[in-house]
Image (cartoon, helix red, strand yellow):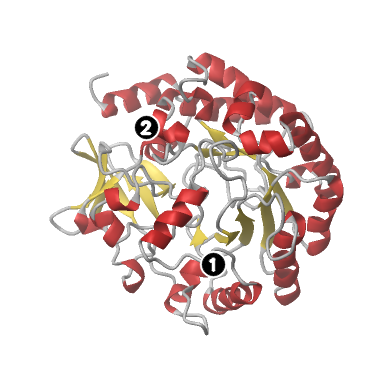
Amino acid sequence: MGSRTALVEDLMERFPHVPREAVFKEDLLRGGVAFDKSALTGNEDGDVKPKSYFIFSFDHGTLPELGEAALNRPPEEIILTGGPYDLRRTVVSVRVNPSSPYRVAADEDGMLGLYLDGKRISDVGVPPMPEYYRHKLSNGKSVMEVAPTIQWGYLIYLTVFRVCQYFGAKEECQYCDINHNWRQHKAAGRPYTGVKDVEEVLEALEIIDRYDTAKASTAYTLTGGAITKTVSGRDEADFYGHYAKAIEERFPGRWIGKVVAQALPRDDVQRFKDYGVQIYHPNYEVWDEYLFKLFCPGKERYVGRDEWHRRILDSAEIFGPRNVIPNFVAGVEMAEPFGFKTVDEAIASTTEGLRFFMSHGITPRFTTWCPEPTTPLGKANPQGAPLEYHIRLLQAYRQTMEDFGLSSPPGYGLPGAGRAVFSVSSFMDSLPADAEATV
């Protein structure tokens, strides 16, 4: 194509039913964005909400490799609007890549813009520092460390266990840098609590509830690494569930409660429901049987792909199909040397998985793969999957939902280009802007 601009414009022309905003968003998510010094935040002392590194690094380099962006953090997310493509409001999670053809910089008037191949393609908005981030817990910890918010303030992300008990090359998911992200923040001397105390979480939520007067925060997610034994004497369902129980007792009905955990047996899933969780995310990661075994060796060893899927279907009987929303990592299907060699093959496989779950009323969602360099798949595939794969996935995803008469899943805000806030993929941007959608 000769330039990234030519590639993007070709895809917008070939796939006119995919919002143009989603084409840019997927490209930024898969390949990252560079930041001029003028676009960095000033960390927690500035006027811009900084990147919190809430679970994974979502960067194309380690902290020492990010240069100025490691010293003064980039914003948590950016909003794209206007420009020559007349972009509607598009929220994009920040994934730093100093060598990206995309760059955020201020012009001579101090206005931030997104530049591609040296040309300004949109205005850039950054999230203001929320008032609740300006207040500390009684022990001096920041709200950003204990209960960061993402998706433009919609979601409180509670990573209450910051490492994973699937450990080492024979167990860790091959695209996941949760354990490395923990290590790099500790090595850099940053506060990064491994196991968050339930009372700290409640205190942070009290601060958010007090100062979030607009009630922008609508949901919370409880998550962290897989637990194969115990943490603090609790198994996985009880460990994550006891936070939900405490939150729901202290703040009944204030937020939509979600939990991301392994696909657990029926009795454990029932405990989540009993604790007050409303939405369950038993992520299935990648559909293809061969790739699941290669890329998720710990999950294959402890549970197994077929059993994982059976448990997802069982959980729908407890939560209701609409409230079971498993994630997959979009793009790893094409990771060399084991992934599919063509976009056609990869889309066919992923669509097979979508049809399997959607035929049971379960609506998966996906995160756009960021090839973090400390992971085996990221190291071998620094460019990630082709942009065409991601655009065609959006098309296939929407078509499959329509085939089964499904609508946007609850707990993600409003769907539609210009309205969506889900920031780590464009699936919500690409769905119809249904005014009756459950948010």
Q: Are marks 2 and 1 in contact (CB under 8 Å)?
A: no
Alpha carbon distance from label 2 to label 1:
31 Å
Marking on residue 147: 1
- Quarter of the picture containing the N terminus is top left
* x, y percent for residue 198: 65, 72
Q: Residue at x 66, y 23 (%)?
A: 289
Marking on residue 382: 2
Name the residue nearer the viewer: 390 or 328.
328
* x, y percent for residue 70: 30, 57
As displayed, is residue 1 above or below residue 296? above
Marking on residue 193: none
As displayed, is residue 177 above or below residue 231? above
As displayed, is residue 89 above or below residue 18? below
Name the residue nearer the viewer: 36 or 55.
55
Q: Residue at x 39, y 69 (%)?
A: 129
* x, y percent for residue 381: 40, 29
Name the residue nearer the viewer: 270 or 344.
270
> Can I make out residue 202 in this image?
yes
- Residue sitting farthest toward the bottom: 138
Q: Is residue 435 left or right of residue 44?
A: right
Amino acid at the residue labelled 1 = Ala
Q: Secondary structure at mark 1?
A: loop
Q: Secondary structure at mark 2?
A: loop
* x, y percent for residue 244: 72, 65
Among the 4 quarters of the image, the one containing residue 51: bottom left
Q: Residue at x 44, y 68 (%)?
A: 191
Q: Residue at x 76, y 60 (%)?
A: 238
Q: Is residue 123 left or right of residue 381?
A: left
The 10 Å Cα crowd at callout 2, few under 14, some 14 to 19, many 20 or more, is some
Amino acid at the residue labelled 2 = Pro
Name the residue nearer the viewer: 408 or 84.
408
> Can I make out residue 419 in this image?
no
